[in-house]
Image (cartoon, rainbow, N blue to C red):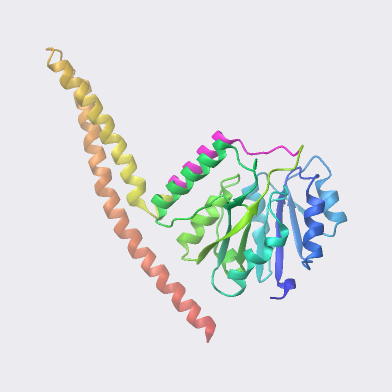
Amino acid sequence: MNKEDVCILIPTLNEGKTIGGLVKEFKSLGFSNILVIDGHSTDDTAKNAENEGAKVVIQSGAGKGQAVSQAFQIITSKYAVMIDGDGTYLPEEVSKILEPVTTGLADHVIGNRFSNYQKGAFTRLNLFGNRILNKIFGFAYGVWLEDILSGYRAFTQDAIKQIELNRTGFEVETEITVECVKKDLKIMEVPITYLARTSGAATKLKPVRDGLRIASTIYLLTKLHNPLFYFNIIGGLLIAAGTGIGIYIVNEWLKNITHIPLTIFATLLIVIGIQMFIFAILSDLIVSVHKENMHMMRKILKEKEKL
């Protein structure tokens, strides 16, 4: 592997305490193409990164997702490594992240933080939330991964070109993973070390709020990939609500109390829920045909590139 073929991407926001050391370490490992996308930091993040030899670009919008999306439009290197600028990942493990993409085993590599994390790196809430989100992702997309929210990743240029990002916040890691699944890209996880945050460096993650946003992203993006999952949940909730109201109506009827409007409402909920199940099956057939067509198109394009 020629290290000149690798771009180290570091999205940052107020990482002045750690960014200088991070860039310096990558430089010492032989990586000269280091791109820092700064989200309008109010500290000396940009200055420290530039002093150590990184190229600093101030992002045009706000949020980590927008920063990564902007960076993907800039990167032209054969390979790219994305790493958070908070000092929680080890630069010396970059070879672990890069090896599968440089050898053709994967299009996208995710560093699995749960294989070796330092005491204090995760709170109990973080650990619980991450595991729940990974399980939801598995049920939704049929791909079981250990750490879909990892911030240490590697990409081929082909993967970068195919990934389309719309989320602007911390949901970006989830969207990247979903995009790779949708585009039939080869995903691999490798074990990495995850460190506790540097003293005085506050986390920007709000566990409950961001966890709910990530869960909603996983669910909403299934609409075009796994409509059975998407519409069956809606149908199930409608039928459960209709059934619950129906039980109340029957219980009242046994007391000689009738609720005609509520009865009509409960019936409508159940009927619409059943229609959602039918719609899910039809949508799944359409999506399956589309996936097969896209798979064939990608196969034809790859064969043309080899000629």
The image quarter containing residue 105 is bottom right
Observer-nearest of 250 and 86: 86
Q: Is residue 202 magenta?
A: yes
Report the side of 292 relative to 183 (left or right).
left
The answer to whether residue 55 of the structure is visible from this angle is no
Magenta span? 201-220
User: Image point 35% across, 59% down: which residue?
Assistant: 287
Figure quadrant of the N terminus: bottom right
Report the side of 255 relative to 197 (left or right).
left
Name the residue furthest right: 51
Where is residue 284? Give x, y as percent. Answer: 31, 56
With respect to residue 102, does 200 lie above or below? above
Report the side of 32 relative to 88 (left or right).
right
Report the side of 254 relative to 69 (left or right).
left
**Magenta stretch prevailing secondary structure:** helix
Name the residue furthest top: 256
Q: Is residue 122 magenta?
A: no
User: Image point 33% across, 45% down: which residue?
Assistant: 231
The image quarter containing residue 202 is top right
Where is residue 34? Give x, y as percent. Answer: 76, 61
User: Image point 81% across, 47% down: which residue?
Assistant: 45
Where is residue 24? Give x, y as percent. Answer: 82, 58
The answer to whether residue 180 of the structure is visible from this angle is yes
Name the residue furthest bottom: 307
